[in-house]
Amino acid sequence: MSEVKIEKAPEGSEGPGYFLTALDKVVGMARENSLWPLPFATSCCGIEFMATMGAHYDLARFGSERMSFSPRQADMLMVMGTIAKKMGPILRHVYEQMAEPRWVMAVGACASSGGIFDTYSVLQGIDKVIPVDVYVPGCPPRPEQIIDGILRIQHLAETESIKRRSGESYKKLLAGYGIV
């Protein structure tokens, strides 16, 4: 039998009947454990993601069981598979419709670097049109790798969401992509 890991509470003062902590720590913990992914799947990496959502790997235990197919309700964009250059503006439009804080995960070799398709019609990495937070390598990546990528985004959601939105480096990054 595996051991159950109890999530520790954020730092704060506690006593009988009360617990006092900072609001950003509580919000970070809530965001970490309730990411709503928007799957943007175009090829074989999407099939691996479907396996990740199945009963054997059970992504629901990480709080990401609710797929959101509306960018306005999602906070994690998962781009999986080959992205044609004609799809670049559409992908960017989907990204811009997402509310802050938002995270992007490039799943597989095609989304990360164009994969084996070094042709005129394939975008050589989605980081040409939108900023990427986590890259998941593989062709296609195993479900364990996709789960690891989600865990990395959960860590970003818990620790950097407030600082990230208001930070100068993030504003410069978005300005570099032409996103206001």
Image (spheres, rainbow, N blue to C red):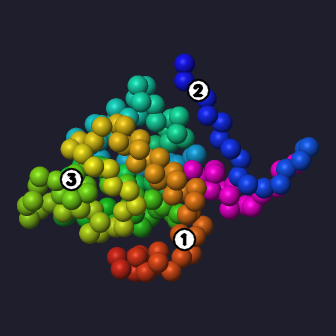
- Most frequent secondary structure within the magenta stretch: helix
Asked whether 40 or 132 is in front, the reply is 132
In which quadrant is the N terminus drawn?
top right
What residue lies at 11% left-to-right and 52% top-to-bottom?
A: 116
**Sequence order check: which comes first, mark 3 or mark 2?**
2
Q: Judge the density around disc 1: few (<14), some (14-19), many (≥20) Cα neighbours within 10 Å.
A: some
What residue lies at 65% left-to-right and 41% top-to-bottom?
A: 7
Q: Judge the density around disc 2: few (<14), some (14-19), many (≥20) Cα neighbours within 10 Å.
A: few
Identify the amino acid type marked 2.
Answer: Glu
Q: Are marks 2 and 1 in contact (CB under 8 Å)?
A: no
Residue carrying label 3: 110
Q: Which label was assigned to residue 3? A: 2
Identify the amino acid type marked 3.
Answer: Cys
Q: Judge the density around disc 3: few (<14), some (14-19), many (≥20) Cα neighbours within 10 Å.
A: many
Question: Label 2 vs label 1: CA separation?
Answer: 36 Å
Residue carrying label 1: 165
Is 1 inside the magenta-drawn segment?
no
